[in-house]
Amino acid sequence: MRDVLDDLERWWAEGEPVGMATVVATWRSAPRPAGATMLVGPDGAAVGSLSGGCVEGAVYELAREVAGSGTPAAQRYGVSDSDAFAVGLTCGGILDVYVERVDRDSFPQLDEVARSIRAGTPVAVVTCVAAATGPDGGDPEGRLGRRMLVWAGRTAGSLGTRRLDDAATDDVRGLLAAGRTGTVTYGYSGERRGDELTLFVAAYAPPPRMIVLGAIDFAAALARVGRFLGYRVTVCDARPVFATARRFPEADEVVVDWPHRYLRAEAEAGRLDERTVVCVLTHDPKFDVPVLQVALRLPLAYVGAMGSRRTHEQRLAQLRAAGLAEAELARLASPLGLDLGARTPEETAVSIAAELISARWGGSGARLSTLTGPIHHEGPAA
């Protein structure tokens, strides 16, 4: 929804009903992740994408019907690779799509959600997208389409019962803290082992952070690539002559401070999380060793350091002498990046970005043409 928020909020403010289709689950080589959204506006305009063009035509017609009737619908798209053209999902993947009407009556808190997203305040939109039918068919509890909003310290709306709301709130806050979008299942009364209800959790957390330590030319290239990948990028260096906004226009912020002192302060202030990546590019022991002592003891997604293999061995010896355990040292990606043969700062930035993506999703880093099996991985690496 984030990508189509401007159009959605505009139509909502004008009191116009909108058909909103959302990918709620994927399998195999699905082209877009869960959370991808397409709108069909009151004027028939289509905004956003679910599959890069594969199933949009079919979903468009369904969304127009739902916008008119107000009755939500769920549809699965995708067949085997050999007959994928039958439904247009040529990649052979599978998409579960949930379609609903959005207007002032069905989503009265949309403006509040929009404000939270734009302000960077974490919020999750929880929607019941599937409910087991009773013996006579239908949705006996009237849960389909119910919605609840979850922030760190409060909620709005209800999924039907207090017990279900309480169970979902606890689980959703965990997903929100990790910035993860996906489905969870419960029994009608909130039983965690039940599967009568499927809830889709769209988590809108602030962008993950990339902290680049060392204001060198490689840092400028990495800041550009990091911004492109959706990170909030900070460049930090203790040397004010090098750490300037003019040298790093793609960074969200440039900080003049000793890297280890800055990183410790950010951790103590609660501004780092398990999605944060730290790239140490100074390859100078007086900067590297102190900051790595801090970084390798924090629950971060990635800690990498630039340098030759000889520098790496010397750095490890210094970190061991400083008291770091082997398990902590094993978390260090050094030399950082994948083996792409990179030479320029821009090529090196791509190499580092490739390693970050591989670490996030559990990819091997090998050429796809030499592998068999699915192209897309099911989820983040364990």
Image (cartoon, rainbow, N blue to C red):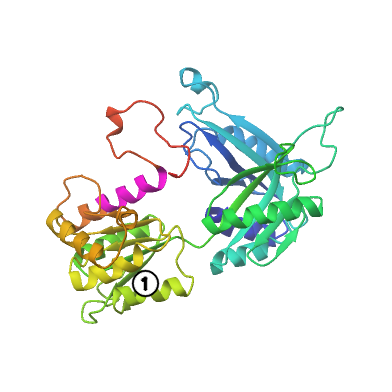
Q: Is residue 300 above or below residue 36?
A: below
Badge count: 1
Q: Main secondary structure of the magenta part?
A: helix
* Whole-percent x, y for residue 151 in the image: 64, 63
Magenta region:
350-361
Residue at 48%, 34% in the rendered image: 30
Q: Foreground residue, 56 or 352?
A: 352
Work out whether residue 193 or residue 196 is closer to the camera in this orientation and state it: 193
Which quadrant holds residue 374? top left
Q: Residue at x 41, y 57 (%)?
A: 230
| Amino acid type, callout 1 | Leu
For this rendering, which residue is in front, 148 or 170? 170
Residue situated furthest bottom in the rendering: 240
Tell whether 10 sits left or right of 188: left
Residue for badge 1: 263
> From where the camera sits, is residue 214 visible?
no
360 falls in the magenta region: yes
